[in-house]
Amino acid sequence: MAEILDADLLKPRKVDADALSKYDLIGFGSGIYFWKHHRSLLDLVNSLPVLNKKAFVFSTRGIGSVWIYHRPLKKRLKEKGFDIVGEFSCRGFDTVGPLKLIGGINKGRPDGKDLEHAENFAKSLLGDLPRK
């Protein structure tokens, strides 16, 4: 996705909230941990000022419904003035809790097909960016 969108990739702890104002579209994503995005990402969003920017949400997950997992992050983003223009999720290798005992689930994921879907999703977001 980053390559398609010509995006900067930053870990949540490396984000300068003031610098976000220069971006037209901001993606927020991580693996899903216990039914929500990583705590560091949620903490980042909580610390942001109201930005009134376009955003998209993405994740990898073991099992379950995307709308449940994305809900906490999307709620926080909307409170910060973000307009959510899309979301993407795919299966990811998961060894949390009892899954570790069986060697995990979704081995080899994300795979080539997942990456192709992510690329297509990123292409769909290009219409939300100003022309260069």
Image (cartoon, grey):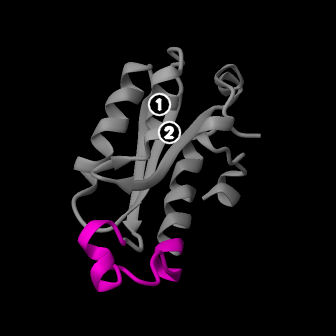
- The kind of residue on which mark 1 rests is Asp
Question: Looking at the picture, how far across and down is residue 120, in whole percent?
Answer: 52, 65
The C terminus - image quarter: top right
Residue shown at the point (33%, 66%) measured from the top left: 96
Few, some or many residues within 10 Å of mark 2 (<14, 14–19, 20+): few
Residue shown at the point (37%, 25%) measured from the top left: 78
Left or right for 61, reference 51: left
In the depicted structure, whether residue 107 falls above or below residue 120 = below
In the depicted structure, whether residue 103 falls above or below residue 12 = below
Residue ID for mark 2: 40
Q: Are marks 1 and 2 in contact (CB under 8 Å)?
A: yes
Question: Looking at the picture, how far across and down is residue 10, in whole percent?
Answer: 67, 44
The N terminus - image quarter: bottom right
The outermost residue toward the right is 132
Task: Determine if residue 130 is in view.
Answer: no
Residue 107: which quarter of the image? bottom left
CA–CA distance in space, label 1 to label 2 = 5 Å
Task: Determine if residue 45 is in view.
Answer: yes
Residue 43 circle label = 1
The residue lying toward the viewer, choosing from 54 and 64, is: 64
The outermost residue toward the front is 101
- The kind of residue on which mark 2 rests is Ser
Few, some or many residues within 10 Å of mark 1 (<14, 14–19, 20+): some
| SS class, disc 2 | helix
The residue lying toward the viewer, choosing from 116 and 75, is: 75
User: Is residue 103 found inside the magenta-colored segment of the image?
Assistant: yes
Left or right for 65, reference 42: left
In the depicted structure, whether residue 103 falls above or below residue 56 = below
- Which stretch did the figure color magenta? 95-115
